[in-house]
Image (spheres, rainbow, N blue to C red):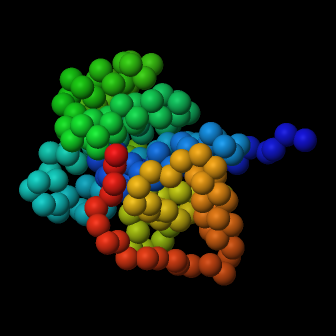
Amino acid sequence: MQEATIEITFYFDPACPWTWLTSRWLVEAASVRSLSVKWVPLSLFLLNNGDVPESFKIPLAQSFKALRAIAQLASQDHFQEIARFYTTIGTSYHYNQVVPSDEELARALEEAGAESAVAALHDASLDELVQHYHNIGLSLSGPSTGSPVLQLSSTIGVFGPIVTEHVRGEEAGELFDHVRALALNPRFSELKRGRTGPPVLS
């Protein structure tokens, strides 16, 4: 009997390196488990009410433009295009340590097969849709959470999981199994270990 597909919604900000590692884990988990992933916006700029350190302003401003396009694509169920777009700009942010310019964001959308969303990068009318997805993600994960949020049912979401380095292959699948089992347990609330260093992105 074929394994039933598990539907996941991943709320994310492309500029966050911890979120990037979690997203790469989820992609790996989907390669060894039957998962269908929806990629939708969650904004660190909105989370902090625009009050961010100077060094984060440009990365988050460019990320917010990307989130407009992601919101438009998500509303049209174009999740594969979002996944390809995120992989490209995430590689720029987190491996190349380069904040993608407007031109690079547009090129990444085109390469992802989402040419129709290029105009969305500068369409402020989509900010409300970004806020809508953002609010849903935080309502699922609860107070004192942020990017990423992993939604595992219509009513259950969790912040994270935060991983410190890449998790690959069957280990990624096993971690997904454990995270899902905990998240779907109505008596489970929190499991946390303090971070001891920056994310390992190599």
Counting labels gives 0
Camera-nearest residue between 195 and 191: 195
Residue drawn at x 46%, y 76% as measured from the top left? 192
Q: Relative to 88, is 49 above or below? A: below
Camera-nearest residue between 94 and 186: 94
Q: Quadrant of residue 194?
A: bottom left
Residue drawn at x 22%, y 48% as measured from the top left? 60
Q: Position of residue 196 (x, y in %)?
A: 32, 72
Q: Position of residue 74 (x, y in %)?
A: 49, 37
Side (left or right) of 200 relative to 82: left
> Does the image show residue 146?
yes
For this orientation, the residue located farthest to the right is 1
> Does the image show residue 114?
no
Q: Position of residue 83 (x, y in %)?
A: 47, 34
Side (left or right) of 97 relative to 28: left
Q: Position of residue 71 (x, y in %)?
A: 42, 39
Residue drawn at x 90%, y 41% as measured from the top left? 1
Q: Relative to 55, is 92 above or below? A: above
Q: Quadrant of residue 189?
A: bottom right
Residue drawn at x 33%, y 25% as measured from the top left? 108
For this orientation, the residue located farthest to the left is 54
Camera-nearest residue between 24 and 170: 170
Q: Relative to 24, is 143 above or below? A: below
